[in-house]
């Protein structure tokens, strides 16, 4: 218990007690573009299934597909658990997981593998694209096993 006048610790939104700023700088345009460069997003954007509101309604407005896709790519390629998605991505772990599941069931990752394999504009991002798809397939297999 803190004595009166003793400084308080900065507020945290993490279970490990670290404040958000020390563990995750704000996801800016630069980081977002490194995780999902334009060369990956351009062919992926038309393949990403559109968001459909949940039948029970409520909740917040839909997030931009690229923002959610970037958060999903972070989870897939970092190997962290969905609940480990840093809040600075602006996407809740539940939303990221729900979209990943919907996209997996819609066959997005296989479509992306085919589309990216023949896309000339990928150039230096070809290996990264392959890593994203491989991580998605691995996570999808784990999802199906339960």
Image (spheres, rainbow, N blue to C red):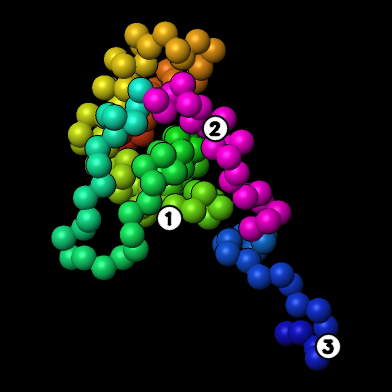
Where the N terminus falls, by quadrant? Answer: bottom right
Mark pair 1, 2: CA separation: 20 Å
- Between disc 1 and disc 3, whose residue precedes? 3
Tags 1 and 3 touching, CB below 8 Å: no
- Between disc 1 and disc 2, whose residue precedes? 2
Where the C terminus falls, by quadrant? Answer: top left
* Residue marked by disc 1: 92
Residue extent of the magenta highlight: 20-42
Whether residue 108 appears in this view of the structure is yes
**What secondary structure predominates along the stretch shown in magenta?**
helix
Q: Horizontally, is 51 left or right of 74 in the view?
A: left
Outermost residue to the left: 55
Q: Position of residue 128 (x, y in %)?
A: 49, 20
Q: What residue is at 33 percent from the left and 54 percent from the top?
A: 62
* Residue marked by disc 3: 5
Callout 1: SS: loop
Q: Which mark is residue 110?
A: none
- Is 36 contained in the magenta span? yes
């Amino acid at each position: 218990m803190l004595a009166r006048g003793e400084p308080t610790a900065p507020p945290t939104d993490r279970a490990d007690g670290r404040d958000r700023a020390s563990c995750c700088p704000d996801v800016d345009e630069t980081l977002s573009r490194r995780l999902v460069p334009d060369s990956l997003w351009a062919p992926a954007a038309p393949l990403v299934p559109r968001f459909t509101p949940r039948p029970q309604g409520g909740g917040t407005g839909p997030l931009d597909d690229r923002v959610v896709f970037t958060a999903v790519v972070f989870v897939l390629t970092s190997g962290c658990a969905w609940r480990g998605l840093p809040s600075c991505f602006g996407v809740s772990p539940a939303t990221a997981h729900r979209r990943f599941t919907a996209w997996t069931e819609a066959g997005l990752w296989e479509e992306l593998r085919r589309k990216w394999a023949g896309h000339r504009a990928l150039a230096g991002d070809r290996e990264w694209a392959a890593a994203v798809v491989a991580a998605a397939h691995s996570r999808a297999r784990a999802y199906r096993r339960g």
